[in-house]
Amino acid sequence: MPVKNKYQHYSLTNKQAARSTAVVSHFKGADLSSPVFNVPTYRAISIQNFIQKGEYVRKRNGYEEIFQVGEVEYFDKFTGNYYKNSVNFNGIWKFKAEDGNWHVVAHIGCLLFEIKNIENNNADTTIEPILAEASDVAASGIVNGVLRSDLNRYYKFNNYKSSAFVGGNKLWFLGGNKYMCLRFTNYGVKFYPVENSEDTFIPTTSIGISYNQSASQNREQLQYPNKLNYFRKNKLVSGVGKDNSQSQTEFYEYTLDAPLILNPNQTIDSNGKSPDIRKIYLTIRTRREG
Amino acid sequence: MPIRDIQIISDVGSSGGVVDTFEIVVSPSLFTIQEMATSSFSKTVLSLFSNNDVVARLVTKRNGVVVGSSAINPSNLTFSKSELTVADALSCAGLIENKIRIWVSYSDYSAPLDVVLDYKKPVKVELTVSDPNILYRGTGEYFSYDSTAVSVTKAKITYNDGTYMNENNPTCWKARVPNPSDAPDYLRGIDVIPQADSVTIYFGFSTSNTQNVSQDTNTYNFVEEHELTILDSPIVSYVFTSQPSSIMLGCKLEHYKNDFVLVGIDENNQQHVLNNYSFADNNYILSGSSISSITVVVGGTNETIILDDPIPLETAIVDKIVYPRIKTSYEEDETFDFRDLTFLIKYVGTDYTETAVFGTSFSVELRDGNTTVLTGQSNFDGTATLGSLGIDSTNSGQKLRFTISTTLCSDVIIATLNVFEIDNIVSLEMANVYTEYNVGDKFLKEDDDTTVVIRYKDSNDNLKSKTIRLNSGYDKLITTPRFGETLNKIELNKEVVVSSAFDSNVNTTYLIDINPQVVSDNSKVISCWAMYSDSFAGYTPKNGLILLMSYDEDDSVVGYIENINDPNQNAKLVLLHDYMPDIERTSNIEIQFPYYVEDAAEDINKCTFGVLFGANNAHNRLFLSGNPDVGNADWHSEEPSYIDTFVSVKPNGDFSYFSDESVMYYGETDNDVIGYEVVSNDKLLVLKNKSDKEKTVYFRNPTLVRALDAAGTEMKDVSNNSTYREEFSLTKGNNSVAGISPKSIVNFNGQTLFLDSNNQLVGLDVVGIVGDNQRYANTRSQYIDKVLEKLDLSDAIVWTNNTYLFIAIKDFGIFATQFRTYDSETKQYEWFYLTSEDPTVFLEKDDVIYFANDQGTLYKYVDGCFMDIKKVFSDYTLRYSTDGKLIVSKDVVEEIDSRSEEDFKFRSLTPKDADYKQKIFYKVALMSDNIANGEQIEINNTGHFLETDLELKEKTDYYLDGYRESNVAATESDLQNVIGVKFRVKQLEPDGLAHGNRYHLYKIVDGEEVKIDITSFNNAKLCCCVEDEEVDISEYHIKETDSVDEYNTITLARDGSNIELVRYGAQLDTHLFKSEIKSYKNVEAFYIVAPFVFGSLDRFKTIWSYTITNDSGIPSEIEVAYASNKLALVETRKMSYISLTKEAMGISLENLSFQKIDLDKVVVPRTYTFHRVLSRQKFICFAFRNFNNTDAVLSSMSVDYSLPFPSVSGD
């Protein structure tokens, strides 16, 4: 008895196969996680330089090199030591400064740079470290036993991926070792540690301090001391009359809310002044006599 | 075996000396060939010897004395040059200095033979002229000569060899007068020759027909002279046969010259029209009614002609009156001096002008509309204030009217000046601002000296400006606040708006300060300065004192501070007097003093990251953390309210105030805070490092609370108002997902996303009804997590501009997504992989994305560009090599060599307007004035045309350089002039102009199309300047010289051909050029679509065709390929770098045959169908790519397929 051949095959010719159409549109991104045959046909299983732009997946734009930063030799403004700066970018920021212009600033290696004319397609793009003071230009120092006077003094910061923030048209920069403020004003650049700078806020820690043995005592605490400024202000009240029950003193003595400690690293000159003493002041408002 | 040099030294015998010195002697050593120069001239050197014109002998000497001599058979001689040609003749030109040196060799000996090629040339030409008595006719200064009436009938040419020839009726002759500056160089037909007592005409004969190649064909030897004989009789009278019908006053006669025809009549009553005359009177005609006679100057003689019909004179017509440049806006009390006015009056048809001044030629009146208000005043001296004239400044209809009478016009001319014209204010600008106001002051008070510059257009649209004080009450300006308004509120930096009354959009602003009015009349301020002193008034405390001295009262001591530098006691301020506060019981004394604490600021100084955050979504407080010494803490800035006796200021964005009280310690361990981001609902997310001991997600919630002091008493400010503190209370999150670094946490349009320690990009989701602080971390990177998990993300940077988000991963590339791809159902983004340069920082500015990396390179993405462009070199160090290249450093050459797959472009960075010495030039071709020299460019003999086979460009500047060419025929001064000679060319159709067989003919033009004569620049170089355009480096060469001076060069190429750089003019080869070299590499993009299985993998399908569609309308190109494990692999281009997920795919994509489709037509949709039957496929996988510098768009694709019906074999 003949055995019937059970072999099956698909015929292309015997009968017209029904044609179908599979359509892919709305191409999406890659699926590099799923097994390949589980990935829908609108996704890529391998992809390079295609990206969603508007409604379509399109080729990415080319990029153009604008500037190659060089290694800057300098003296550290903190320590005076000689360094050669590395060129790795740690941060880049733009901000509209007090001079009304947009400035681009970058933390590269250990220094903070200003990038000028970044949009001019490198015709006159410059990247130079920001000087704190004009006198830092061509400062002199010893490098490998040789006196060099062709290098500048710059603030040296930590070499790390840093952060900076814009406030009041100023850039507040975390150097990792110093908290800095960068200002571009109509009078030039100001770049300084916030700590104890002349622009750093001085809190009024107490108000209403009246003199000892005064008829009334109502001192109040107002603001907390500033970690970034060891100066503080006290407000006093005079003319409140002495308490007759207390023994009278000739002068009017007020106890302030903290010890007065001068920065021990400063010296008092022959005129009785030091930077700290110059910043001590007293203002009295009083009724005009007569 | 080494070969040695053997020297024979004989005995010094009777004959003595060194024996046997051989020499070859050629005689004569200087030989002149005189031949008729023809283009086919050539002579073999051998023939000189064969004809015995020159003989070579071998001479034997002994001890310097000739002992033997024998002629050498010419056939045994060899020559360094075998043939003398026309070209040799050209270079030699019959001059001994330019002789040609030929080396004659025989055996081991050689001798020079100098040959001068001299040609048979004419030395004398004698002419016979048809009529030696040449006549002229005409009169006056000039007369005419008719060269057609007389001709040269015979030329006798004598040659330098004494022979001569006669040429009858030669055609090549010219006639001219002695001084060509008086007449054309050569007389042509009837020419005008200046008159003289005796005029000689010279006849010249061109020797060009005699083939003397050294002669320019336009050069004539003038060998005959003949005197002219007068033909005509002199003029005896003159008459105008035509004249203008009238003449306008104010014109000159010359103005009408074309209307006059002057005729001279000679003795024979013959008329001659005379053109060469002038009018004796060259002045403007200003008066009279007619002209009856005119004097003309003919041939230097005045001839007065009486006109039969006098020409009437017409009254002039005033064209316009030019107003004086004077101020046209006046204050009422400002004096207006009419004597300063000068009107300029112009007339139609003449350039005669006239001025009118007050008192003599004009009077003034004031009119209001059409009504005369004021008509002069008795005893009016010309000066008046507008007020005194009765001009009302508020009535802009009033005009000053000037009545001007002129000499040429009998009419009275009315000129008017608007008195007040400011009704079209264009702009306002503050010139000087006063800012000091106190509460209660009236705005624009008396001492406010603020001034404003008003720019306005007068009725003639002229832009004018006027500066006024803002408080002058000028009613065309409106201020906010209003003039005189009382300022009631303390306000710093209050904006004042000054605007035009006509258009409020024309305005300007400035700021004033309104300070509290506390400095009343009955209060005063004593300001003191400080100094250290050991004692005061006999009181000497241990640590000394700080004395406080008044600035105002002669440094008198007001008080002192004691307990200096004593950390155990608060400082004590001692005042010598009591002071009554100006306002009772208010803090009236302020003291500022230091309380130095070592390293107090270090907590803040060492912070490494932070975030701006604040209550009510204000980002006005700076939170700082990342201090390695206190890693689990942060601090935040506080509002630095300046509580001052005078004014309370709250400046925004001052982050200089951090108090001890702002510190927050997170969690139970010292595990570090890793980063921040602001999440929705006004919360700050604080992430800590991964830890299994504590939660790692924290939130800070801002609240305002009343400030209490240490004793719990409510704190009030100086005005006794409650003070508030911001508090940022801490809430713990519910999970332990941990961030990696502060640089991988972002807010992507409100979604907080960060890379977590499980190598995923996660977002925090509020799910179900859990509290807002209970958020679940969910991956947003599911589609790429398999890849991310294998990568080191510790240095990865996540950056967003809120359109795109980039995860930049070192040594890998960028995973990018776009915000609109977010699927809120699956909470997934679509991910794309981009090649990159390992960026570590990003910046977006003006819609351009910049990035930079650890190699110090800054890049930007360029819209519409699909090439990655890198600098290879940019410096000042390039200079010319001696062989037409640029010398660069070895590094540059090596770098270019190592990147052979990229294109390089060279660009000079020298500005276009720089001095030529700083620019780079290259040679286009050498120029010659004779085609036979075989140079690429021939100067046409006119000097104004170039003939060449080269294609020159009409819009390119060409330069001439001949500075170093030894055989340039020009003089030294010519050469100096060459530097900077710049011209352009215009291509001409080669027409009848004589030129050789060159393909192109160009006219030389400079900017104004003026011809430049470059005839003398034979052998000069035609150069171009690299700075005019970018140049591609398509190939380059490295050349090494000796080991001391090794140098590397690059060769520049233009349009695919190398160019030869030349030093131009006085350029030095030591000059360093600033330039750059960039490489261009196409962005290589591909997209491999997941395989089509059409239902399941277990059945075979037939693919009939597939169609690619682009409905985007974006010009693009794409290449398509397919792969299937079933397909036989065709060896084509290998895409080995599709290795990203190759292992995982299990599909052979090793060999893909791509077919290119240009979808660059702007026809939407554009489709392309591949008809290809692919039978028995289990699946098919398509790949798209674009490796060109063009865009590529994936729009849609359809696959036409069938599932065949099963059939059973053997049925």
Image: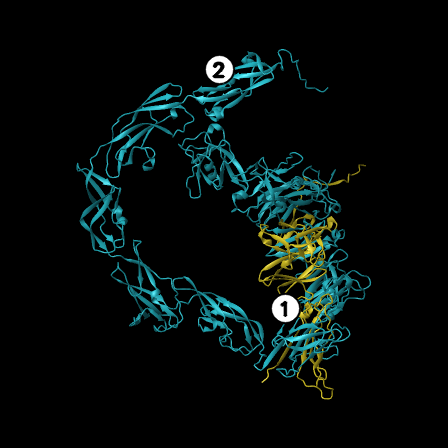
Chain colours: A yellow, B cyan
Name the quarter where the C terminus of chain A is drawn: bottom right
Residue B361 in sight from this viewpoint:
yes
Q: Which residue is mark 2?
A: B53
Q: Which residue is mark 1?
A: B652
Name the quarter where the N terminus of chain A is drawn: top right
Q: Residue furthest right?
A: B693
Task: Locate residue B93, reporting x and y percent.
Answer: 46, 25
- Mark 1 secondary-structure assignment: loop
Mark 2, Cα crowd under 10 Å, few <14 / some 14-19 / many 20+, is few
B94 in relation to B753, above or below? above
Task: Locate residue B258, reporting x and y percent.
Answer: 26, 46
At label 1, the amino acid type is Asn
Subunit that carries the residue with mark 2: B
Judge left or right: residue A116 versus residue B680.
left
At label 2, the amino acid type is Asp
User: Toward the viewer: B1065 or B138?
Assistant: B1065
* Residue B460 image-quadrant placement: bottom left
Residue drawn at the location 61% of the way across and 58% of the way down: A103
Mark 1, Cα crowd under 10 Å, few <14 / some 14-19 / many 20+, is some
Q: Residue furthest bottom?
A: A245
Viewer-nearest of discs 1 and 2: 2
* Residue B674 image-quadrant placement: bottom right
Judge left or right: residue B676 versus residue B506.
right
Task: Locate residue B421, reporting x and y percent.
Answer: 39, 67
Residue B766 in sight from this viewpoint:
no
Subunit that carries the residue with mark 1: B
Q: Counting residues from the N terminus, which is met first, the one under dot 1 or under dot 2?
A: 2
